[in-house]
Image (cartoon, rainbow, N blue to C red):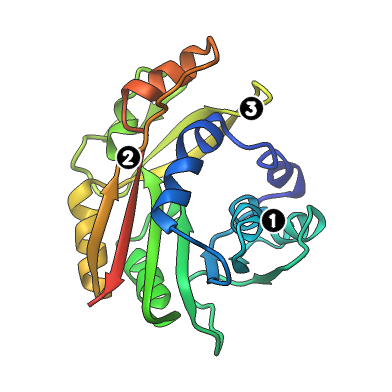
């Protein structure tokens, strides 16, 4: 489990979150006023606060006690936080939207990914949807000097680990460790969990106002992709 120092390092948003992902995620979610919204793997509540400010009734779940403590400390008014593993979280409440950000990319087990998605499906209202934000499989081929893959890595190797340093809005870089899943894997995950795909979006920065090579690279390559799905 992360220590508190590591958890705090993620309080500052990445450039990608602020300049690439935010607009696309909100557009895909649509009107959030009075919608009941659950985030599995909410971390320090970054997205929860954004969704709440747009009228959603929010519940955030994360297995890290340190992250939940930070979320509760960092302007948690109107948001319910729970310490729980995403695949085991249970409640009688049902949600209009379940949001999952960078959870599958951090999960090395194929079976566990499917279990997380099945649990997300069980927590939805009848006409609810799940929105996934995940690392694009092509990110392991980005021209970043700080990206490292294992010796046995190749594109079609399921669950292959790699590390990458991402840039925050304060110009600091933090290291994240992810696991490589290709697009076919995501399709299989969702099919086995009982979903049909409604929309796929590959966000990119449309307006680069900063003279920042990191953002320029991210505007030319697909670093993330969003998927909106509904239960079958």
The secondary structure type at the circle numbered 3 is: loop
| Few, some or many residues within 10 Å of mark 3 (<14, 14–19, 20+) | some
- Secondary structure found at label 2: loop
Which residue is at the far right?
A: 73
Residue 159: x and y, percent? Answer: 31, 49
Q: Nearer the viewer, mark 3 or mark 2?
A: 3
Q: Residue at x 60, y 72 (%)?
A: 84
Badge nearest the viewer, 3 or 1? 3
Residue occupied by mark 3: 169
Residue highlighted by disc 1: 67
Left or right of 108 on screen, residue 84: right
Dot 1 crowding, Cα within 10 Å, few <14, some 14–19, many 20+ = many
Q: Give the residue at x 19% y 62%.
A: 188
Mark positioned earlier in the residue sequence (3 or 1): 1
The reply, left or right, for residue 122 in relation to residue 88 is left
Q: Secondary structure at mark 1?
A: helix
Q: Which residue is mark 2?
A: 136
217 over 42 or under it: above or below? above
| Earlier sequence position, callout 1 versus callout 2 | 1
How far from the left and from the top, in percent, is residue 33? 56, 66
For marks 3 and 2, give the CA distance.
21 Å
Q: Residue furthest top?
A: 211
Q: Is residue 82 visible?
A: yes
| Residue 55 location, quadrant | bottom right
Name the foreground residue: 46 vs 142.
46
Nearer-N-terminus badge (3/2) = 2
Are the residues at dot 1 and dot 2 in contact (C-beta closer than 8 Å)? no
* Residue nearest the observer in this picture, 130 or 142: 130
Whether residue 104 is visible, yes or no, is no
Residue 10 as seen in the image, left or right of residue 25: right
Residue drawn at x 73%, y 57% as measured from the top left: 71
């Amino acid at each position: 489990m992360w220590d508190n120092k590591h958890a705090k390092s993620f309080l500052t948003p990445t450039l990608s979150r602020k300049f690439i992902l935010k607009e696309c995620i909100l557009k895909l979610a649509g009107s959030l006023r009075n919608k009941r919204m659950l985030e599995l793997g909410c971390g320090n509540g970054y997205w929860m606060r954004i969704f709440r400010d747009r009228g959603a009734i929010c519940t955030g779940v994360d297995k890290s006690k340190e992250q939940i403590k930070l979320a509760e400390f960092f302007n948690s008014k109107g948001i319910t936080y729970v310490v729980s593993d995403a695949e085991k979280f249970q409640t009688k409440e049902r949600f209009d939207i379940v949001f999952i950000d960078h959870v599958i990319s951090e999960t090395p087990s194929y079976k566990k990914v499917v279990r997380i998605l099945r649990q997300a499906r069980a927590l939805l209202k009848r006409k609810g949807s799940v929105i996934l934000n995940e690392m694009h499989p092509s990110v392991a081929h980005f021209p970043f000097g700080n990206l490292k893959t294992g010796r046995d890595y190749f594109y079609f190797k399921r669950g292959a680990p790699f590390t990458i340093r991402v840039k925050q809005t304060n110009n600091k870089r933090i290291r994240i460790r992810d696991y490589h899943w290709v697009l076919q894997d995501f399709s299989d995950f969702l099919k086995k969990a009982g979903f049909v795909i409604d929309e796929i979006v590959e966000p990119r920065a449309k307006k680069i106002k900063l003279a920042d090579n990191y953002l320029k690279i991210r505007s030319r390559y697909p670093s993330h992709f969003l998927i909106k799905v509904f239960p079958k």
